[in-house]
């Protein structure tokens, strides 16, 4: 049996360096040029077959193993957030206004670390491993264009795995859940068109602000009165803009928001439901509207058999007592697209500790020792699926 624990610990300094190098050069969606060049160069030096420029900045490294067999894909995201870092770390972002505030630097270092170690034992494995690095997970989503570019074929991907650092579970634990883990995530934009005028003469106007507030209220009734309360759903209006001064009734109002659900039938019904409400409210109040609805990521569904493999491998790394079943989250993840095309599992790597900043926070940081846990889990999963 291969001693992955020893191998990973021997590469601790390398894995830490990879994370810090990548933390220095954060790049938001579809601008990940330095990042993808770093990743591609590293994979190439490991002797992998490297493809670059996929869906603009995506990278895939193909590792061919000892004999014929199935293909495993290990996926990482690469993009950063438009956040100004406030960690004070000596390796803080060198790109003003950008930061790896969602841990994607850690994701990349774990997949590159796994590639390094699995390359040393590839004569013990059969089939292929694709190490996939995608752009734009934070939006508008790089997974779908990567798939459209053919990353799930040549060779065909049989299994897909990935993980996310997760402050909601304790540091060093691993969260594995079969079935739905993360929600479908969409966006809507609504423009209300009324008739502006003097604040003292409302009878001569169609108040777009008033119409808009009624739309917001009516949208909230979708979750509270149209949905089965045992099926979690969320409708959030995150931005509302109307008017510019105290004594003018605004002629236009704009809002945007998001919907979340685990139910695919509900997911596909959102555009019609929202259109019906906006049309009804505006019609009753004499206003017109423009609605744009963009379907984002599908619900993330983990295959039961692969999730069990990940659970067993995680237990070998951290012990049974530290493998937990995490709560479902209404957050979205475009790893869901890969899991529609192959069996697979997306799991959480616990980084939660006292005082830890949440994801997307300018002070977010993690204990780099946890990255070794992720690397070893990936390696053990590869051995079980391809050994």
Image (tube, helix red, strand yellow):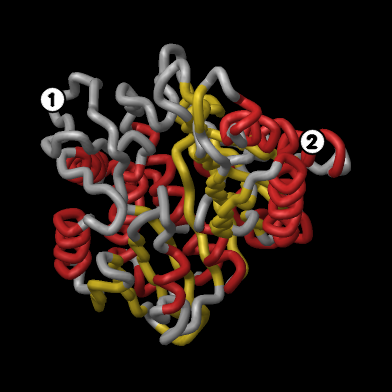
The mark nearer the N terminus, 1 or 2, is 1
- 26 relative to 81 in the view: left or right: left
Q: Is mark 2 on a helix, strand or loop?
A: helix
- Pointer 2 residue: 221
Question: What residue appears at the point 36 percent right and 39 percent down from the top-left corner?
Answer: 103
Name above or below for residue 314 compared with residue 295: above
Left/right of residue 366 with respect to residue 223 in the rendered view? left
In the rendered view, tell whether residue 86 sits above or below residue 32.
above
| Pair 1/2: label in front | 2
Query: Neighbour class for label 2 at 10 Å: few (<14), some, many (≥20)?
Result: few
Is 383 drawn above or below residue 185 in the view shown? Answer: below
Q: Is residue 117 left or right of residue 153?
A: left
Residue 358 position in % (x across, y down): 44, 25
Quickly name the residue at label 1: 90
Q: Which image quadrant for residue 128?
A: bottom left
246 or 180: nearer the viewer: 246
Count of numbered circles on the image = 2
The residue that appears at 51% across and 37% down in the rendered structure is 251
Residue 176, x across and y down, in percent: 62, 44
Distance from the alpha carbon under mark 1 to that under mark 2: 49 Å
Which of the 4 image quarters holds residue 194?
Answer: top right
Q: Which residue is drawn at 28% across and 64% down?
A: 120
**Residue 59 at what x, y percent from top left?**
28, 67
Q: What element carries label 1?
A: loop
**Residue 350 visible somewhere in the drawing:** no
Residues at marks 1 and 2 touching, judged by CB atoms closer than 8 Å: no
Q: Relative to 194, is 82 on the left or the right?
A: left
Residue 8 visible to an observer of this rendering: yes
């Amino acid at each position: 049996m291969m001693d992955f624990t020893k191998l990973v610990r021997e590469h601790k300094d390398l894995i830490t360096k990879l994370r810090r190098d990548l933390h220095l050069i954060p790049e938001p969606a579809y601008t990940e040029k330095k990042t993808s060049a770093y990743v591609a160069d590293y994979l190439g030096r490991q002797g992998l077959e490297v493809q670059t420029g996929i869906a603009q900045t995506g990278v895939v490294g193909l590792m061919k193993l000892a004999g014929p067999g199935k293909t495993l894909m290990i996926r990482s995201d690469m993009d950063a957030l438009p956040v100004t870092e406030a960690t004070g770390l000596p390796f803080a972002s060198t790109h003003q206004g950008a930061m790896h505030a969602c841990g994607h630097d850690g994701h990349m270092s774990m997949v590159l670390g796994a590639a390094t170690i699995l390359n040393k034992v590839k004569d013990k494995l059969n089939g292929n491993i694709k190490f996939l690095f995608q752009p734009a997970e934070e939006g508008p989503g790089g997974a779908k264009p990567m798939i459209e570019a053919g990353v799930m074929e040549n060779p065909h991907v049989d299994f897909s795995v990935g993980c996310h650092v997760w402050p909601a579970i304790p540091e060093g634990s691993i969260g594995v859940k079969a079935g739905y883990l993360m929600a479908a995530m969409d966006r809507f934009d609504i423009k209300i068109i009324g008739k502006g005028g003097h604040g003292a003469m409302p009878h001569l106007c169609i108040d777009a602000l008033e119409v808009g507030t009624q739309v917001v209220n009516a949208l909230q009734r979708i979750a509270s009165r149209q949905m089965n309360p045992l099926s979690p759903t969320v409708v959030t209006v995150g931005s509302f803009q109307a008017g510019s001064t105290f004594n003018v009734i605004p002629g236009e109002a704009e809002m945007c928001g998001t919907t979340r659900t685990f139910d695919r039938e509900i997911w596909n019904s959102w555009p019609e439901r929202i259109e019906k409400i906006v049309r009804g409210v505006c019609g009753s109040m004499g206003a017109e509207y423009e609605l744009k609805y963009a379907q984002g990521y599908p619900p993330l569904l983990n295959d039961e058999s692969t999730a069990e493999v990940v659970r067993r491998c995680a237990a070998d790394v951290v012990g049974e007592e530290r493998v937990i079943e995490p709560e479902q989250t209404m957050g979205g993840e475009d790893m869901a697209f890969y899991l529609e095309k192959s069996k697979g599992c997306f799991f959480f790597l616990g980084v939660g500790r006292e005082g830890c900043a949440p994801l997307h926070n300018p002070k977010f940081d993690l204990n780099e020792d946890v990255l070794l846990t992720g690397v070893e889990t990936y390696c053990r999963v590869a051995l079980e699926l391809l050994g």
